[in-house]
């Protein structure tokens, strides 16, 4: 398989340069372990995101070691070539082929790591490692350090400082490069096609799992390797459960259907939510609340651009939603007061209780500090958006039956979510191919 290794080689060089700026040292980044489903079968394997970000290598039982010193090195430890195991489990690169294919300076068999790591750690200035992320590897690292310490009388010293390498990688992963943006656009296009397919197939009498099956079919048919997360397909009152999982509830005439589903393509996620009527036509109350949520999303997307703070989009959405709650009578003005009162006291949380977005990338809830990492103190300001960041924008409204809540809105759950890339001059909606206006949704469903 041909792979463009340039982004991975570049990222390793960037991390080594950051390590050298701190005085040098050695970084250890493992991939994910294989996990057993039962005594003799494994779950489908998915590599660790940090590991893949630096390597492009997808095999299990592998570790990256980066040496930042007089002679910088990137080293891969991986499984030996084994033709017999390939009959059962599929192709293995082996160290030498992997070194050449993925642009490493050296590669060794994973079975030699206990011998090689103490040599590499000897006299290293610092250790860059995410302690606590892998208990088995934690124990190995402790043994390697102890092995180096036993050489003290020979003038050999272990690393004298330690840094969490994942924090450094979080900052790198937060700003997407051109290759990542291309993959995220393709992932969003596949997910958008899956949402269109679900809208076209939906009709009263089907069940939630029928729509989930159509979504998964479109994901895989288009080359996605996995869903990015467990798909949410929720009809009627189920849409008011934020993390509802697709089940067997029947789609009924007059109900809305909320689908929150995204795919993973070559390790990059999409995350799209659409809400639409089972019968193809919004009722009056449904349309009223839907257009309220859409207006909130429009306001939030307008705040998603360079120089704005991460929470500006949320604040804009809340202001629109809270005013709509007052206008529709979901919130009683006589009891809750003015718009500013509602926002200050948080009364809107009865119907909108989550944040308007999150980082998106290799993981659906991707890494990166939401507050200004350079600011001092505990109550740091929210992070300023920069070109290359990707966020979701996903306001919603969820109306459960309750005293004082107008009955025509009961059991209506609506969320509209898009994937938004911050660009140098503004923003770009990666998931724009998924219909979301009332007119576009109804046209698609009624002309299917």
Image (spheres, rainbow, N blue to C red):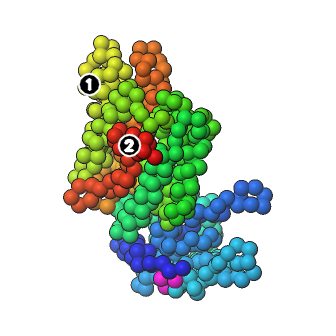
User: Which residue is pictured at 40% across the width and 74% down the height?
Assistant: 7
**Pointer 1 with pointer 2, Cβ within 8 A:** no
In the rendered image, the quadrant that contains the N terminus is: bottom right
According to the image, label 2 marks what residue? 443
- Whether residue 107 is in magenta: the answer is no
The local secondary structure at tag 2 comes to helix
According to the image, label 1 marks what residue? 339
Residue 162 visible, this angle: no
Which residue is at the front of the view, 79 or 327? 327
- Whether residue 102 is in magenta: the answer is yes
Kindly report the distance in space between the C-alpha atoms of the residues bearing marks 1 and 2. Answer: 35 Å
Judged left or right of residue 10, residue 245 is: right
The local secondary structure at tag 1 comes to helix
Q: Position of residue 396 (x, y in %)?
A: 39, 36
Q: Decide which of tag 1 and tag 2 comes sooner along the chain.
A: 1
User: Which residue is pictured at 37% across the width and 21% down the height?
Assistant: 330
Q: Mark 1 vs mark 2: give the one in front.
A: 2
Residue 188 visible, this angle: yes
Q: Position of residue 69 (x, y in %)?
A: 42, 81
Judged left or right of residue 75, residue 93 is: right
Q: Is residue 437 above or below residue 78?
A: above
Judged left or right of residue 122, residue 178 is: left
User: Which residue is pictured at 26% across the width and 59% down the height?
Assistant: 423
Disc 1 crowd, CA 10 A, few/some/many (<14, 14-19, 20+): some
Q: Position of residue 75 (x, y in %)?
A: 52, 80
Q: How many marks?
A: 2
Q: Is residue 36 above or below residue 77?
A: above
Disc 2 crowd, CA 10 A, few/some/many (<14, 14-19, 20+): some
Q: Which residues are magenta?
A: 101-105
| Figure quadrant of residue 42 | bottom right
């Amino acid at each position: 398989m041909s792979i463009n290794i340039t982004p991975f080689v570049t990222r390793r060089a960037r991390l080594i340069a950051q390590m050298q700026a701190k005085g040098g040292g050695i970084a250890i980044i493992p991939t994910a372990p294989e996990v057993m489903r039962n005594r003799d079968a494994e779950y489908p394997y998915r590599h660790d995101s940090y590991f893949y970000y630096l390597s492009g290598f997808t095999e299990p039982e592998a570790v990256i070691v980066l040496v930042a010193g007089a002679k910088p090195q990137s080293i891969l430890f991986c499984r030996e070539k084994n033709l017999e195991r390939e009959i059962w489990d599929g192709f293995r690169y082996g160290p030498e082929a992997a070194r050449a294919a993925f642009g490493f300076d050296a590669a060794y068999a994973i079975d030699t790591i206990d011998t090689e790591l103490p040599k590499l750690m000897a006299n290293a200035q610092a250790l860059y490692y995410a302690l606590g992320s892998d208990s088995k590897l934690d124990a190995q690292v402790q043994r390697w350090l102890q092995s180096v310490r036993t050489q003290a009388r020979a003038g050999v010293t272990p690393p004298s400082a330690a840094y969490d390498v994942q924090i450094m990688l979080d900052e790198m992963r937060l700003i997407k490069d051109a290759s990542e943006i291309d993959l995220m656009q393709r992932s969003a296009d596949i997910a958008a096609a899956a949402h269109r397919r679900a809208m076209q197939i939906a009709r009263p009498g089907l069940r939630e799992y029928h729509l989930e099956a159509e979504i998964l079919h479109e994901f895989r048919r288009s080359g996605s390797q996995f869903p990015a997360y467990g798909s949410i397909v929720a009809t009627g009152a189920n849409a008011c459960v934020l993390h509802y999982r697709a089940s067997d509830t029947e789609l009924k005439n007059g109900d809305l259907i909320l689908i929150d589903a995204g795919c993973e393509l070559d390790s990059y996620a999409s995350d799209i939510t659409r809400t639409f009527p089972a019968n193809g036509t919004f009722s009056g109350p449904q349309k009223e609340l839907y257009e309220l949520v859409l207006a909130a999303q429009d306001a939030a997307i307008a705040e998603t651009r360079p120089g704005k703070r991460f929470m500006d989009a949320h604040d804009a959405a809340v202001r629109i939603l809270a005013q709509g709650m007052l206008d529709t009578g979901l919130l009683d003005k006589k009891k809750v007061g003015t718009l500013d009162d509602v926002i200050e006291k948080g009364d809107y949380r009865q119907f909108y209780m989550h944040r308007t977005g999150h980082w998106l990338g290799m993981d659906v809830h991707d890494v990166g500090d939401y507050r200004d990492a350079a600011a001092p103190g505990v109550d740091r300001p929210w992070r300023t958006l920069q070109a290359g960041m990707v966020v979701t924008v996903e306001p919603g409204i969820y109306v459960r039956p309750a005293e004082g809540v107008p009955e025509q809105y009961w059991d209506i759950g609506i969320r509209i979510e898009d994937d938004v890339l911050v660009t140098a001059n503004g923003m770009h909606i990666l998931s724009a191919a998924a219909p979301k206006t009332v007119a576009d949704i109804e046209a698609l469903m009624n002309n299917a």
